[in-house]
Amino acid sequence: MTLEFGNIPESCALDKRDASFLAEIVFAYLACTIGPQSSRGSHLWTAKNRDTLARIFRRAYLHPSVAGAAMHLIGRLKRKQPDLEVNGKAGLNMYIAALIIADKIVHDRHLRRKSWPGILSDALTLAQLSKLELMFLEAIDWNTRLECAMFDNFQGMFHGWRYIREHSNNIDFFLNRRWDNIRPTAFDDFDGVESNDGVRHDFWPVNGEADDVWGDPGECKMS
């Protein structure tokens, strides 16, 4: 089925297994995109982050394609900041911001802002979420355009991941040095390169600085 903005369900209940599979592919994408490119960074990206994603997906009742749209926005940010590398906590916060934005892009009746703290087990306040969302939008120059083909590409990739996982164990890209600096071709194909996604090297702090910025968003006044 070809997915377009108009026919992506506003509510989708994922069972535990599908939520786990979705969390795995998102975690793998984040690890290979904004995580450390070496197994030496495994202590910064742990299974706890992946489990947190699975809980979020089950509680948010969002269609997996919304999670895919958030991944695509992360890829857009990475192309603007090729040297961006963050730890697991900062990466999770970054993805949460992208997920909130993706929900607004895809759905006319998106999740209410006040619903998110509960979905996140009150790990972030409304003020912190508002700040993270604004930071992310500024980081991608407010470019929230998504192509319909991206949704189909994600659906194909997710179904492929589910099939692989039903016949094998999860691939942990931090488990073994042989995965160092390896990024699945499917992720590169999913990202694509858009003509208005120009690279700017000096737009956002990298490495340790980004951990500080995204890891602890602090509070901000709600508008």
Image: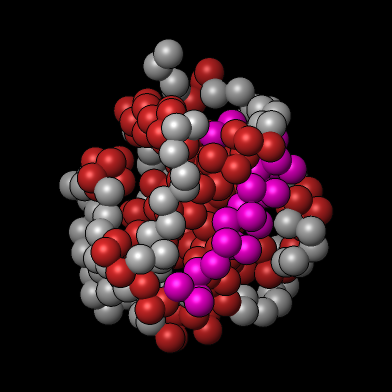
Q: Write down the quadrant of residue 220 in the picture.
A: bottom right
For residue 197, say whether it is visible: yes
Q: Nearer the viewer, residue 114 or 176?
A: 176
Query: Which residue is painted at 52% across and 84% down in the image?
Result: 212
Where 15 falls versus 218 (above or below)? above
Is 62 covered by the magenta stretch?
Answer: yes
Give the magenta range.
42-64
Where 126 falls versus 219 (above or below)? above
Q: Position of residue 214 (x, y in %)?
A: 53, 74
Q: Position of residue 14 (x, y in %)?
A: 66, 32
For residue 62, say whether it is visible: no
Q: Write down the quadrant of residue 52 in the picture.
A: bottom right
Query: Which residue is painted at 38% across and 78% down in the image?
Result: 40
Q: Quadrant of the C terminus?
A: bottom right
In this view, the residue farthest toward the top is 1
Q: Nearer the viewer, residue 210 or 186?
A: 186
Q: Position of residue 73 (x, y in %)?
A: 41, 51
Where 142 falls versus 81 (above or below)? above
Query: Which residue is painted at 52% across and 57% down in the image?
Result: 95
Q: Nearer the viewer, residue 6 or 43?
A: 43
Q: Position of residue 209 (x, y in %)?
A: 44, 86
